[in-house]
Amino acid sequence: MKTDVFASRHIGIREKDLSHMLKTVQVDNLEQLIYETIPDEIRLKKPLDLDAPMSEHKFLAHIEALSKKNKVFRSYIGLGYHESLMPSVIKRNILENPGWYTAYTPYQAEIAQGRLEALLNFQTIVTDLTGMELANASLLDESTAAAEAMTMLFDVRSREQKKNGVLKFFVSEEVLPQTLSVLKTRATPLNIELVIGNHEDFTFETDFYGALLQYPGKYGQVHDYASFVSKAKETDIKVAVAADILSLVLLTPPGEFGVDVVIGTTQRFGIPLGYGGPHAAFFATKEQYKRNIPGRIIGVTKDTDGKPGLRMALQTREQHIKRDKATSNICTAQVLLAIMAGMYAVYHGPDGLRYIANKVHSSASTLADALEKLGLYQINTSYFDTITVKANAKKIRPIAERHEVNFLYIDEETVSIAVNEATSLNDLNQIVTIFSEASGKTVENIGELLQACNIPESIQRTTPFLENKVFNSYHSETEIMRYIKKLERKDLALNHSMISLGSCTMKLNAASEMLPLSQANWGNIHPFVPTEQAEGYQIMLKGLAKDLTTITGFASTSLQPNSGAQGEYAGLMVIRAYHKSRGEAHRNICIIPASAHGTNPASAVMAGMKVVVTKTDEKGNIDVADLEEKVALHSGNLAALMVTYPSTHGVFESSIIHITKLIHDHGGQVYMDGANMNAQVGLTNPATIGADVCHLNLHKTFAIPHGGGGPGVGPICVASQLVPFLPGNPVIKTGGEHAITSVSAAPWGSSLACLISYGYIKMLGHYGLTKSTETAILNANYIKHRLHGTFNVLYTGEKGRAAHEMIIDCRPFKQKGIEVTDIAKRLMDYGFHAPTVSFPVAGTVMIEPTESESLAELDRFCDAMLSIREEINSVDPDNPNNVLKNAPHTLEMVTNNDWNLPYTRQQAAFPLPYVSDNKFWPSVRRVDDAYGDRNLICTCAPIEAYAEA
């Protein structure tokens, strides 16, 4: 083995295993398998034009050299982004720990209790600090969270408001510029009319349904909004507030003056700037909106034994159930970042957060006092961390940049300075020196922080927060380290066993790809610094975009969308803009196959399109006759077809070129969902099949870890006619010549996470990427053949092959009283996370092994499935007291003195010999979803509960 070839480390199948696997799938060589899987007419005719692959060692040297091209200035720009200090214990034990970053979305609650508890902590922090009743388990960024608030309040308008066509939404001029840009994008297709102005001049007319305020304002002024909210209520105008979460330690929580929604970002809680992300946004609201709130909610329930358990609550409101009726297309979040931010609050506790907030405020007060002694006028009458001074910006800027300092230059005579947790006395003195040099005046060095308060008493916080035991127990490094480990042990992640989730591509997240995320030269760059200060980032981002453009066969790429669903939405908005530019704004019909992800129809509705669903035939393929009929019917108004390729059923449909040509012939554009791109890279591509735009899930095909449900990145790649419309940013120039407004807050979205995919491509190169795709297809077909005759594969290609995934039909087992959920829970006893359950077909599992798995691991999984099939055979349908219905089996259950079950403890916990070598114990028995939804509890237990215990 060549030890310096990364592909041999990333791909799990050894050369010696190939002959056995090829024999099993009944082909002579790998090329024959690919030929029988992918239609020849869409195969690429030449290798991808990518750089030669780097060894891991060379890549790490390369990325280190690139990082040094970034100039890490002290940035006091603010605008929703602030330097923060990540505790090393969190960095080492969560950010750099595959036990946390390789975990999947907690759909299987029994093996996800650790991250569910961490997310419950996060929700409690948000509800406590905002003063609201309910919070979700994070969103993508502050700006998109604000857009979600605007659309949620639009959806919950009163019957009278809907009847009267009330469409106006007031946006305070204090709102962050990037948020306003995202609001404009979201508002346009929904016909929401944004009215931007001064909240003090607002007239509270009945043709407004909602309003958005910023707290503190974009340049630091803290307003008392109590009167505004009171007057808004009188006219049935619902109010959302974008709040700085650290400021809420000192400021009156918005919930206490009656707002309906509070949103923001938790980046200040120990998360790197990362040139814009990823960061976990928060969304808090009233309990009456629990079925309207976007994103995931973690709730408390009980397990089979009546003991507390956690799981995702109210899932029926989400897009995979409600599809085009969903209020949001959010299918992921920023779970890893939410966990880290939550752990920051657990580690510091309420007293630590007060200390940090008071220090930040004192730093701002001290700086304001020093600058006033220089004769500079400070505008803000009340502030938390940001002061705004009247000064000669043109003169100050070159001096500041010579000192490696960034301020926010509002205009030629106004400079804003946002201090942060990392700001020291030396930093304050450096700032004073800069202004002193510009003004020609001197002032004494700052010797200590003033304890003055520049927050009016009327808006100072008086209520306690984070009184729960968890926030008052783990303040030494030893204790927090053990708490983090305790939670980690409750979660099954990719570092324990294969996670064979169809459509979710849980592949290796290589250590060499992840290491750069910990480096300060990548982590500590504000997204709005001048681009010349981020040269390393610019080279990396442009390189990644170029490679993704090459891989997809398109003309250009935007990295701005920060999730797959966000990429869908961005792609459709670009298509919308294209049609409008041609005088065809009336094109609003989006055709979507019935088998599509629920995010597809939800995204189409958000983009202002009407969804028309087409049938699938008995083989699971798009029903071409039905499609032709619907395309002809809607020809004059056809905007787009959304298609997943290979299909959600795991098949390369041979009719794809006919389908895409049909859409083009009727004036539409083809959007390809990139969820299954892992079966295409190097062998075919979206451009070749006739698509015009696709999004790519970098957290699937391109190795960004799922992180328990995020971070994700969902860039869009487009054909030449769509390039002019790629999304822009109001602060830093990005996008096409006729760019649509922003789809996310930062110019290049979650830039820090893009380092992972950049490394993945650079280390694999053309050969490694193509080999990965071939191996993913081989692995899927190997599992298919091993399970053949025992489980029925629902759909295959014309030559009987699966693509990179397959659907196993579990519906026949109902005659034995066994549901697909029972199989999913029983797999936990074998040490495996279940494949995707009941999607896209109810009563099935969809298996995708990825290229990273070894033959031994594939065989262990197959052995587990075959063993479960034997267990199903032995089940008495009249007796539900069996090993499948009782799964999963916990350690407490198996070691209990009472054992009255009709099978042995060994059968329950160690059903195959390999299990005992690496046993994973679920920490709770099967959780009761219905009970948890009926009795919704989404925060940690109050302190009284511990006192009673």
Image: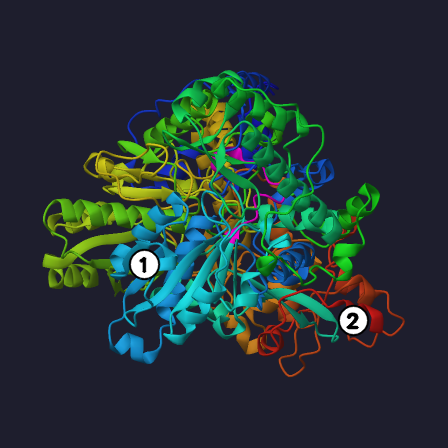
Q: Quadrant of the N terminus?
A: top right
- Label annotation for residue 944: 2
Q: Amino acid at mark 1?
A: Met
Q: Is residue 474 left or right of residue 191?
A: right
Q: Is residue 270 magenta?
A: yes
Residue drawn at (79%, 50%), measured in percent from left and top?
474
Q: Quadrant of the C terminus?
A: bottom right
Q: Measuring from the top left, give residue 178's x and y in whole percent.
A: 39, 44
Compared with 330, 685 (above or below) is above
Q: Measuring from the top left, give residue 46's x and y in whole percent.
A: 31, 25
Between the residue at mark 2 and the residue at mark 1, the CA separation in whole angstroms equals 43 Å
- Label annotation for residue 94: none
Residue drawn at (60%, 40%), measured in percent from left and top?
271
Quarter occupied by residue 320:
bottom left
Specify how the rendered protein is coloured: rainbow
Compared with 796, 545 (above or below) is above
The magenta span reads 264-277
**Residue 777 seen:** yes
Residue underneath mark 1: 606
Q: Give the prevailing secondary structure in the magenta stretch.
A: loop
Camera-nearest residue between 399 and 116: 399
Name the mark nearer the viewer: 2 or 1: 2
Task: Give the mark, 2 or 1, whose residue is nearer the N terminus.
Answer: 1
Residue drawn at (58%, 40%), measured in percent from left and top?
853
Q: Amino acid at mark 2?
A: Glu
Check contact, mark 2 vs mark 1: CB within 8 A.
Answer: no
Element at label 2: helix
Q: Measuring from the top left, give residue 73's x and y in whole percent.
A: 54, 24
